[in-house]
Amino acid sequence: MESLGDEPWDVVICGTGLQQSLLALALSRSKKRILHTDPNDYYGQNEAALTLQDAESFAAKHAGGASSEADEKSVIRNAAVWKPDDAEAQGLKFPRAYSLALAPQIIHTKSKLLSSLVSSRAYRQVEFLAVGSFFVYEPAKDGSDPKLSRIPSSREDVFSSQSIPARSKRSLMKFLKFVLDFESDEQKPIWEGHADAPLTDFLTAQFKLEDDLKRYVVALTMALDGKASVRSGLAAINRHLTSMGTFGPGFCAVYPKWGGLSEIAQVACRAGAVGGGIYMLDTSATVKPSGETEKASLELPNNITVETSSIISGQETTTGVQAISRLVAVVKSPLSSLFQVLVEGAPTPAVAVVALPSTPSPIYALVHSSDTGECPVGQCVVYLTTLATTDSKHGLEQALTMLIKAVEGEESTASCLYQLYYQQAIGDRKSTTENHGTTPAFSFPPLSATLAFEDTDLEAVKTAWSLVLGDESDEETYLVFEDREGADAEDEVYE
Amino acid sequence: MADSAGAPRPSSSVKLVLLGEAAVGKSSLVLRFVNNDFQENKEPTIGAAFLTQKCNLPTRTIKFEIWDTAGQERFASLAPMYYRNAQAALVVYDLTKPTSLIKAKHWVAELQRQASPGIVIALVGNKLDLTNASAAAGGNSEDEDEESSGAAGGDGGDESGDARKISTEEAKTYAEEESLLFFETSAKTGHNVSEVFTAIANAIPETSLKSTRGPGASNAVSRGGDEQRVNLTGPRGDAAKDSCAC
């Protein structure tokens, strides 16, 4: 075994969360000596994709709740897994047949994350699937059963919709046209005065949208508190609309097959390894006290001590009080009607988004078909999210039942085969830098606890990159790489 | 072996992953196969994402996309994405180093757990040039390969200068139990190297080779294949840049 401790490292990256992994990718052509460790025996940390076995150890590790002060501050808490006693008899397959994503964020097609993966050539190893329809849950009324209404997602879609009365269509069209260039000098005066007011009031006042349509628009903002402001709401709807059609008809966002951001973290780490980085899972690194004029050293298991010129890690505790509750459920039904191709030439969607009304805040469900590789054929994985309250676990479980019945009818026998529940703190989203001796130690904030990937989460990666490279950092080369030898995709292909 | 004349044969991409203990010669085997080259005292692998090499069979062409471990095997840190969709695996051990076969068995078990059910696994004992068999094998024509490999097992390797620690019989028996292809090779002399890849190519079931981009093709995102895949760089990526849904 090579001696890790002989020469000082240029950088030790602790943790393989998305941001640390993207940093490893960004540094993969830099000739820096990089040691990349993770305390878990899997990649991805809070963005990992877990087998059922991993989920159990994850739940055990993060089971702590409000009882102790330390747990109260940890980013992941109150975790628990559940399955029916006869889960296997009902159809639960072996643990590795599942890949439950801790970060099931959809990625809008215009996201910088995608363009960075393309410019760094890392995208070749990721399979992207389309995110399809967005739905709103309609409770039972006038004797009709509860159902899911599909939100029309483009102007053609609104135009051809049968369910919207002609007059409402005109108002909605007017609104959509406005959103498309809401930041122009012409449109700004219309909303700037109300920028921080609730979007829903603005929709009534300016566009006279009826309640049903307002619910559609608010659902599309994917704001977890259900109370998007005019500014943030318009930005979210604009992103939704302008992302449509970028990579093909009928979808505005993509999802990496096999477990979402986990897959991107793994691919980025592989790029780090190909560039010469040394990878050690199941290895925790702790900083040893050092003199003021010395480099910091880190202690690894088996009494190995390494010196390093910089340390990069992720914040595992947070001062934020607000948290989200997540319920990941394996359901014994494909819920196929959620994954229909609605536009000619569109790829078969693998993800559907459902907004369910709930108090005090709405519940969102991201439903993943087995095409995501996260569960066996014939099943699906539902990721439910809401703002955490004392009762949110119960609320999420109820929402799951409502969702299944709305898709399959009241008589549905589709049962839940497995559940992973946890809460995730919404941090203050600021990176921190401190010094250990002469060694700067940079710490990534937790990823935004949102349903769609936020490009602002990429900023800290670039900050860390500049910190590690110092004078050598050249913005032009940030995540812009040539293909490595042998990775020629387009050489001769016989048809 | 290339035949530029005549109708092109159907071509399929196959993802092949390398596994095995550090320094058993994984990269060297691939280097021999792809470039017909060998480097003495090669540094641990850096910079090789993957290499491609075609293998021409009588009725079709197999294009291997060979993924190297990039050193992530050293501290048992290979990611699930490495095994994913691999249609073939080369599990390499050093036949002068007993622990490396134990490690190889561990990788075979790992593949059977993590990889696609139909994966073709070849167990390869490398560094045959360090055994007595090398005297016979190294300088001889390819026709006698089978014989010299077989003879090595029979000899038991007691004579001086023979560094062999794992008998052909032992590894072969294990390979048969687990339904693995089995070869002893020397990346240094090139002995049996192309045979390994040809045997793998022949063992890949026709059914898993439907499209020019097999289901395991790492870069299949760029071409057809599954209808649900999204292409991030195709013509749409540029053409649609300025347009929107409306």
Image: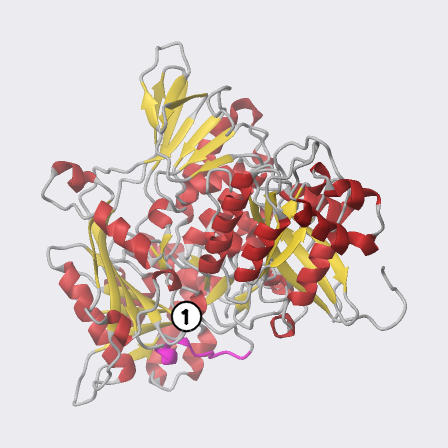
Q: Residue A62 in the image: x percent, y percent?
A: 22, 46
> In the image, is A384 to the left or to the right of B226?
left
Visible residue check, residue A467: no
What percent of the width, then of the height, locates residue A487? 67, 50
Local packing at callout 1 (Cα closer than 10 Å; few below 14, some 14-19, many 20+) is: many
Q: Quadrant of residue B143?
A: bottom right
Tell me the residue at 37%/15% (across/down). A437
> Which chain is disc 1 placed on?
A
From what the image shows, is residue B77 above or below residue B177?
Answer: above
Q: Is residue A315 above or below residue B228?
A: above
Residue A341 in magenta stretch:
yes
Image quadrant occupied by the C terminus of chain A: bottom right
Determine whether the residue tagged by mark 1 lies in a helix, strand or loop: helix
Q: Residue at x 62, y 67 (%)?
A: B214
Q: Which residues are magenta?
A: A335-344
Residue B150 in view here: yes
Q: Residue at x 81, y 54 (%)?
A: B144
Q: Magenta region's main secondary structure?
A: loop
The three-letter code of the residue at mark 1 reads Ser
Of A423 and A451, nearer the camera is A423
- Residue occupied by mark 1: A370
Q: Position of residue A258 (x, y in %)?
A: 44, 60
